[in-house]
Amino acid sequence: MDNIKSEDYKISSKVRIKDLNTFEDFDSDKQTLSSALRETRKKLGKLQDTLYAHGKYAVLVCLQGMDTAGKDSLIREVFKDFNARGVVVHSFKVPTEIERKHDYIWRHYIALPARGKFGVFNRTHYENVLVTRVHPEYILGEYLPNVNSTDDIDKEFWDRRFEQINNFENTIAENGTLIFKFFLNLSKEEQKNRLIRRLNKPEKNWKFSPGDLDERELWDQYMQCYEDILNRSSKPHAPWFAIPADNKPAARLIVASILLQEISKYKDIKEPVLDPEISAKISEYKERLQNE
């Protein structure tokens, strides 16, 4: 859709989450939105083929949002037309024992996409300034020196962590990774509706955990942390985009459109030129094959 402009969703100045939109439909029904997504993702898939052939950029897509925000289905629908070799998805869960033996960015660093590929992080390194701020006791499991109790986790601790994350993103951006960070902005009321639907559908019951309700009670704390994340880590080389997430078809279309618009700005991303010596003999090669 021509009325989707990436700048309308980019966080480029200080924001308050309560002022951000959670619903969009572009005055269109689900079928129209889905049709627009199919067209957009086909173009995005072709662009990915060119990116792969060019081989000098990687694309990192970061997805953050509250439970039921639609991250899994968005990944499935937006990247459906990609060549399987061109996209790798990582869903980050609770850190393993070996991951806790390294710094908190380590497991994300080793999962970064290679040049020519898309990498999708379903939950990201920002969990380390989100869940751990709501539950600072989790930090104690990171075996950090000079952190022996939650009393040692102060404002300066979080300031340093934000600086580390910003430095991490700056480093990979300077080395050819295009970074796109999407906050799926779900309303509390819509989350309630989705949790109820999850409970009502036997095939979806497995996704539900009583812990979902416990975390929901901390909604305001999470929103405060998300607001801080958006305001402290949206940079020109690694911008955040706030995506209205109450309407899944529209959210998927917005994300796909932003990726297509922004990556298309890199005019140096083009398929390599065939070696002149090979190009001059194409007719000869065709003839050899036809005469087999």
Image: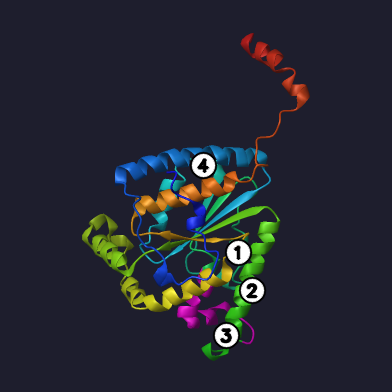
Q: Secondary structure at mark 4?
A: helix
| Amino acid type at mark 3 | Lys
Tag 2 residue? 163
Residue 171 position by quadrant: bottom right
* Of the image marks 1 and 3, the number of the one nearer the N terminus: 3
Q: Residue at x 73, y 17 (%)?
A: 281
Q: Which residue is mark 4?
A: 44
Mark 2, other Cα within 10 Å: few <14 / some 14–19 / many ≥20: few
Left or right of 250 in this view: 123 = right
State which region is magenta. 127-146
Residues 260 and 18: in front is: 18
Q: Amino acid at mark 2?
A: Glu
Q: Amino acid at mark 4?
A: Leu
Q: Nearer the viewer, mark 4 or mark 1?
A: 1
Colouring chosen for the image of the structure: rainbow
Q: Is residue 131 magenta?
A: yes
In primary-sequence order, the first of circles 2 and 3 is 3
Q: Say which residue label 3 marks.
A: 155
Residue 238 location in percent, x, y? 60, 60
Q: Is residue 82 left or right of residue 103?
A: left
Which numbered disc covers residue 235?
Answer: 1
Establish if 198 lies above or below 149. above
What amino acid is labelled 1 in the image?
Lys
Mark-to-mark CA distance, 2 and 4: 32 Å
Residue found at x 52% / y 88%:
150
Q: CA distance from mark 1 to mark 3?
A: 21 Å
| Residue 287 belongs to the span the image colors magenta | no
